[in-house]
């Protein structure tokens, strides 16, 4: 099986905004990602701090990732949708990109589903 590119976004949110941020992600941002064909592996508040958040997305390769994300972030649905509400709650954002097998991605997805 061919490895896939996984992007891990970690956010340190402004104090006290984690619950609202999670609602925005669940109700608006993740559905928008899915409508645009972006595979969201998992997302949510960190177990250690409700104001720490993560989002994992998977792509075929780095070129596809860049193209899809450029299109997503330029879209009117993002710009007039959850963009402002999300960005105003983020204090620090970190991004990591790695290669994982489809099995590893499924294991990550399933482990988070089992603990929700």
Image: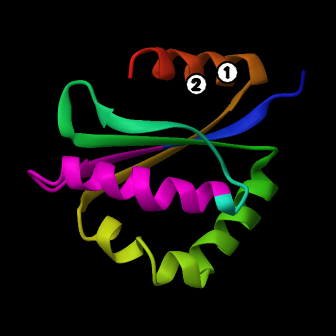
- Magenta-drawn stretch contains 76: no
**Which region of the structure is painted magenta?**
9-34
Q: 29 or 27: which is nearer to us?
A: 27
Q: Residue 97's spot in the image, x, y percent? A: 60, 41
> Badge 1: few (under 14), some or many (20 or more) residues near its Cα, within 10 Å?
few
Mark 2 in CB contact with mark 1 (< 8 angstroms): yes
Q: In screen coordinates, is 103 left or right of 13?
A: right
4 displayed left or right of 114:
right
Where does label 1 land, which residue? 106
2, above or below 104, in the image = below
Q: Is residue 44 above or below residue 109?
A: below
Give 7 or 49, whichever is nearer the viewer.
49
For the point 74% across and 17% down, the residue is 103
Residue that numbered label 2 is attached to: 109
- Verify whether residue 16 appears in magenta: yes
Q: Residue at x 64, y 54 (%)?
A: 34
Q: Is residue 65 left or right of residue 12?
A: right
Rendered position, 3 above or below 95: above
Of the 4 image quadrants, the one containing the N terminus is top right
Q: Residue at x 9, y 52 (%)?
A: 15
Q: Nearer the viewer, residue 34 or 63?
A: 34
Q: Farthest front residue?
A: 27
Q: Position of residue 8 (x, y in %)?
A: 51, 41
Q: Position of residue 48 (x, y in %)?
A: 20, 25
Mark 2 residue element: helix
| Quadrant placement of the C terminus | top left
């Amino acid at each position: 099986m061919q490895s896939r590119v996984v992007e891990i976004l970690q956010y340190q949110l402004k104090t006290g905004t984690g619950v609202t941020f999670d609602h925005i992600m669940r109700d608006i941002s993740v559905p928008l990602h899915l409508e645009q064909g972006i595979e969201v592996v998992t997302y949510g508040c960190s177990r250690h701090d409700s104001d720490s958040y993560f989002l994992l997305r998977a792509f075929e390769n780095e070129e596809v990732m860049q193209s899809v994300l450029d299109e997503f972030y330029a879209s009117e649905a993002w710009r007039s949708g959850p963009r402002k509400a999300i960005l105003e709650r983020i204090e620090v954002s970190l991004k990591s990109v790695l290669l994982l097998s489809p099995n590893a991605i499924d294991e990550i997805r399933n482990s988070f589903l089992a603990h929700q």
